[in-house]
Amino acid sequence: MKVAILMGSEKDMPKMQPCADVLADFGIEHEVHVMSAHRTPERVAEFVSGAREAGFGVLVCGAGKAAHLAGAAAAHSTLPVIGVPIAAGGMGGVDALYSTVQMPTGIPVATVAIDGAANAGYLAASILSVTDEDVATKLAGYRDQLKG
């Protein structure tokens, strides 16, 4: 399975790149797409509603300010959605954090720290490792390295 990395604007790529780097390090196929919950909502709905059939296993969504991308994705898919609140604007990302983490019951979004795209990549790898033994082995090896 592969991972979709979605972001609201091309300006978000420097903050989302660590997610792509982690996935690449684990050999996990991924695609990066720019789409906005507010400027291109139909595109978001169409992409995420067909994501499972397109071979995706996890959706990682990064957005700042109102940060509704992860919630919009979760509303249109039963795939795991990981939200990355991005610091943009005057509140240092706290606005995006609250928007991402405060989801209604039944439409969950796993949320990492503000600008925590690397951890989103590790979480996506963990999710895929449930059914992918190769990813599970690589993840275990990485965790062993963290022990020093």
Image (cartoon, grey):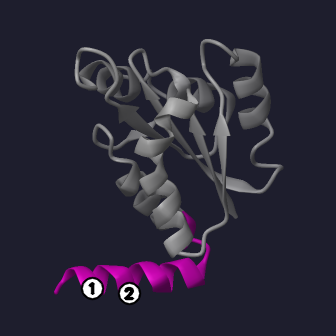
What distance separates the C-alpha of mark 2 from that of mark 1? Answer: 6 Å
Circle 1 residue = 145
Say whether marks 2 and 1 touch (CB < 8 Å).
yes
Neighbour tally class for label 1: few under 14, some 14-19, many 20 plus, Cα within 10 Å: few
Q: Residue at x 33, y 41 (%)?
A: 115
Quarter in which the N terminus is drawn: bottom right
Quarter in which the C terminus is drawn: bottom left
Q: Could you tell me residue 136's position as x and y percent? A: 49, 79
Q: Amino acid at mark 1?
A: Gln
Q: Give the mark count.
A: 2
Q: Could you tell me residue 4's position as x and y percent? A: 64, 48
Q: Is 84 displayed left or right of 113 in the figure? A: right
Q: Nearer the viewer, residue 137 or 89?
A: 89
Q: Main secondary structure of the magenta part?
A: helix
Q: Residue at x 38, y 56 (%)?
A: 118
Q: Is residue 108 visible?
A: no
Task: Give the answer, above or below, for where 47 lies relative to 57.
Answer: above
At numbered mark 1, what does the secondary structure look like: helix, strand or loop?
A: helix
Q: Residue at x 42, y 55 (%)?
A: 18
Q: Residue at x 41, y 38 (%)?
A: 84
Task: Give the answer, above or below, for where 130 lies relative to 138.
Answer: above
At numbered mark 2, what does the secondary structure look like: helix, strand or loop?
A: helix
Magenta residue span: 128-148
Q: Which residue lies most toward the left here? A: 148
Tell whether position 66 is magenta.
no
Q: Could you tell me residue 92's position as x and y percent? A: 23, 24
Q: Is residue 142 visible?
A: yes
Q: Amino acid at mark 2?
A: Gly
Circle 2 residue = 141
